[in-house]
Image (cartoon, coloured by chain):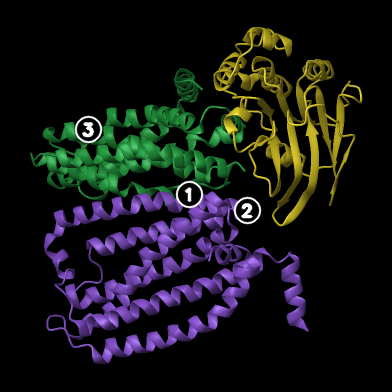
């Protein structure tokens, strides 16, 4: 198998999943609307007072990002599992890890990327200081791919189950904690006008680790789930 | 030596071997528990800072150690089952999970009981307690996945993958929680980090630790035997054994 | 609960092709089949027969390597299929119950994806392949708007664009009309007569002589 055909397989899966996502647009839109609604619940539940909202903003945005990612995760493998496409992928002579990486990349492009683009707006709603905006974008850019990669493992493990939804969040959310800690702390630190290099390095390290190991675990989990 | 392990991989031999080992383990666990608790409650000196309430560490610390240890046992045996398709490794992994969760809960409960006299509240977002809580979530996820998948072999393999993913994540989670904790409440962390412990306090702790380990071994073997009975109920050796014992 | 085989074709070269040795499968503590032996070599087809629930689909999934055998082994050219997986898979086309045709994509797009996933590709163009399975004029309609039989034809068109020697087909004639069944049958017999191999579960009789066709019966 040449590198060119590997890359071609990766691109095909990526393009296929993007086409599918664009043809069922509500699947992209719904988690985003959820993201906005969850964030806007906090001023109503806690207090509209700007000082308080400013301090909780990083955490609120990140928790909402985690939850809305959870909602979109199932779409990575669910419909492909049901109509047999996943079987075909497992029977492709190309390594499953490459195909998984293609699918996860597509998932991130339709769920993570719009989240990043929307986040400054939500920052404004929660009175996040302007200095913290670059940190918000940077942590989301580094963190959301990790969420997609780790989430894919959880979906792969639960895809064969009829009611996998709640179980999926039980499996995946604890694994999201490190990303949550470093990302929301980075934003808060940036708001206090301090350097956030350390946090970003850590997020980048987690990204590197996830991108190398998660596709392996996902491919193994898919093989098990499809038995 | 190798052939011993090889034989242990067969459910029949494991079942019989465990059956012989259980009484020995049971008695030594009981004796160690009595010695450990006696030493811990009556012989070890009173702590000059914390008074008598520190004595809960003789339960809390071994439970916390075991909670990590059991997760490792679970992940390693799960991995063995996944790679070498060894049935007994799957049995061990699935039998270990509820025990590990129980140790974790014990560590959390004793930790919060200790917290009341120490900090005046039942719960504090201390680094170790928080890590322990997340570990409990990991255990619960493992158990939930296991019970959601009907086919035994699929369940064992899926859980093994989850446990291995957890093992990669535990150090990261642990480190990030420690880091988060020092940032938010640096003062409380140091309270746990006592300087070198007096020998008279350490010996009961180590005794209790050993007792916990043996207890884990004991309950693990008992649970594994039950699981073997369930899995192998249709095999000939099992039927022979049951008819023999019925005579 | 035994499996009987009949008329095993004696192949000339021992190692080439697919060989099943003492294969057994149990599901949820229930034994589906055991001690299954057969060999499939170039220019032969095997029809798997058996009542519902006898494990036909399970057997096919095992032959593809999707499911691990509970006992016994499956060899491709003399080696276990899990050993050199990628080499085995590049020789295999499988169409299961769920045939993997995406409703949101057009037949042409579906085939394009399959083409990129395969190891080798035929000179036959995608349009030609669609025409051969009787889908001329439907290339660009979303597959969701096609009938069940037409969607299965899209899946079967994959066999034409990826020229693999081994076809494993689970009920290929389901939902397909009589005229289409003839076309598919010709496709399969052509493949076998040209030196291909096919394993299928179907009660549909194939127009092949005894030399080329044998059957494996699974009983409950």
What secondary structure is marked by label 1? helix
Q: Which residue is mark 3?
A: A138
Residue occupying image coordinates x 20% and y 78%: B117
Q: Nearer the viewer, residue A133 or C6?
A: C6
Query: Mark 2 or mark 3, which is nearer to you?
Result: 2
- Compared to residue B245, the image places residue A4 above or below, namely above
Residue occupying image coordinates x 86% and y 24%: C212
Q: Which residue is mark 1?
A: B161
Residue C11 at x, y percent in the picture: 82, 28
Image mark for residue B151? 2
Residue A217 at x, y percent in the picture: 45, 42
In the rendered view, does B147 fall on the left or right side of A174? right
Counting labels gives 3
Hue of chain A? Answer: green
Residue occupying image coordinates x 31% and y 37%: A207
| Alpha-carbon span between mark 3 and mark 1 | 31 Å
Q: Residues within 10 Å of mark 3 (few under 14, many from 20)?
A: some
What secondary structure is marked by label 3? helix
Tell which subunit mark 2 falls on: B
Hue of chain B? Answer: purple
- Compared to residue C131, the image places residue A124 above or below, namely below
Residue A225, quarter of picture: top right
Q: Are marks 2 and 3 in contact (CB under 8 Å)?
A: no
Q: Which chain gets the yellow colouring?
A: C
Residue occupying image coordinates x 27% and y 49%: A45
| Alpha-carbon span between mark 2 and mark 1 | 16 Å
Question: Are callouts 2 and 3 both on one chain?
Answer: no
In the rendered view, does C41 fall on the left or right side of C8? left
């Amino acid at each position: 198998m040449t590198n060119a055909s590997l890359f071609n397989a990766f691109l095909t899966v990526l393009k296929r999943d993007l086409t599918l996502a664009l043809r069922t647009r509500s699947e992209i839109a719904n988690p985003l609307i959820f993201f906005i609604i969850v964030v806007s619940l906090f001023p109503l539940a806690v207090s509209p007072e700007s000082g308080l909202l400013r301090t909780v903003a990083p955490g609120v945005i990140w928790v909402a990002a985690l939850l809305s990612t959870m909602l979109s995760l199932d779409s990575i493998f669910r419909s492909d599992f049901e109509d047999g496409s996943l079987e075909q992928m497992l029977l492709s002579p190309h390594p499953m890890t490459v195909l998984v990486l293609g699918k996860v990349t597509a998932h991130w492009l339709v769920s993570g990327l719009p989240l990043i683009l929307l986040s400054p707006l939500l920052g404004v709603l929660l009175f996040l200081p302007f200095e913290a905006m670059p940190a918000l974008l940077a942590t989301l850019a580094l963190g959301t791919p990790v969420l997609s990669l780790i989430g894919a493992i959880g979906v792969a493990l639960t895809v064969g189950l009829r009611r996998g939804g709640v179980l999926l969040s039980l499996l995946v959310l604890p694994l999201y904690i490190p990303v949550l800690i470093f990302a929301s702390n980075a934003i808060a630190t940036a708001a206090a006008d301090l350097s956030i290099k350390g946090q970003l390095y850590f997020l980048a390290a987690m990204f590197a680790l996830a991108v190398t190991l998660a596709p392996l675990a996902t491919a193994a989990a898919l093989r098990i789930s499809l038995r | 030596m190798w052939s011993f392990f090889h034989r242990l991989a067969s459910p029949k031999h494991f079942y019989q071997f465990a059956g012989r080992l259980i009484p020995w383990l049971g008695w030594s666990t009981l004796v160690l528990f009595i010695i450990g608790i006696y030493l811990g409650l009556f012989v070890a000196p009173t702590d000059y800072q914390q008074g008598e309430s520190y004595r809960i560490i003789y339960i809390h610390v071994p439970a916390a150690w075991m909670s990590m240890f059991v997760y490792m046992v679970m992940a390693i045996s799960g991995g063995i089952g996944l790679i070498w398709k060894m049935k007994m490794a799957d049995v061990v992994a699935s039998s270990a999970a509820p025990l590990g969760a129980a140790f974790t809960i014990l560590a959390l409960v004793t930790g919060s009981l200790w917290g009341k006299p120490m900090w005046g509240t039942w719960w504090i977002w201390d680094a170790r307690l928080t890590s322990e809580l997340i570990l409990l979530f990991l255990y619960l996820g493992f158990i939930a996945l296991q019970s959601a998948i009907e086919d035994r072999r699929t369940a064992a393999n899926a859980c093994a993958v989850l446990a291995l993913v957890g093992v990669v994540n535990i150090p990261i989670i642990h480190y990030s929680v420690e880091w988060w904790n020092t940032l938010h409440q640096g003062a409380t962390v140091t309270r746990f980090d006592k300087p070198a412990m007096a020998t008279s306090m350490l010996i009961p702790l180590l005794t209790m630790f050993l007792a916990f380990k043996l207890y884990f071994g004991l309950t693990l073997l008992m649970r594994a035997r039950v699981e073997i009975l369930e899995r192998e109920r249709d095999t000939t050796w099992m039927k022979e054994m049951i008819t023999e014992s019925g005579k | 609960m035994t499996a009987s085989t009949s008329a095993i074709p004696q192949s000339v070269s021992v190692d080439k092709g697919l060989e099943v040795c003492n294969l057994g499968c149990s599901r949820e503590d229930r034994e589906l089949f055991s001690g299954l032996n057969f060999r499939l070599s170039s220019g032969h087809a095997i029809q798997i027969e058996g009542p519902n629930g006898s494990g036909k689909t399970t057997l096919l999934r095992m032959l593809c390597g999707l499911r691990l055998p509970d006992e016994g082994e499956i060899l491709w050219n003399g080696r276990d299929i899990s050993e050199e997986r990628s080499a085995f898979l590049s020789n295999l086309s499988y169409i299961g119950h769920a045939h993997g045709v995406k409703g949101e994509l057009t037949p042409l797009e579906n085939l394009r994806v399959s083409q990129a996933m395969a190891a080798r590709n035929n000179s036959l163009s995608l349009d030609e392949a669609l025409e051969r399975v009787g889908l001329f004029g439907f290339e660009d309609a979303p597959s969701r708007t096609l009938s069940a039989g037409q969607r299965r034809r899209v899946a079967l068109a994959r066999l034409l664009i990826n020229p693999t020697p081994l076809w494993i087909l689970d009920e290929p004639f389901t939902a397909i009309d009589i005229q289409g069944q003839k076309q598919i049958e010709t496709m399969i017999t052509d493949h076998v007569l040209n030196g291909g191999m096919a394993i299928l579960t179907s009660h549909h009789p194939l127009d092949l002589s005894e030399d080329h066709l044998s059957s494996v019966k699974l009983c409950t």
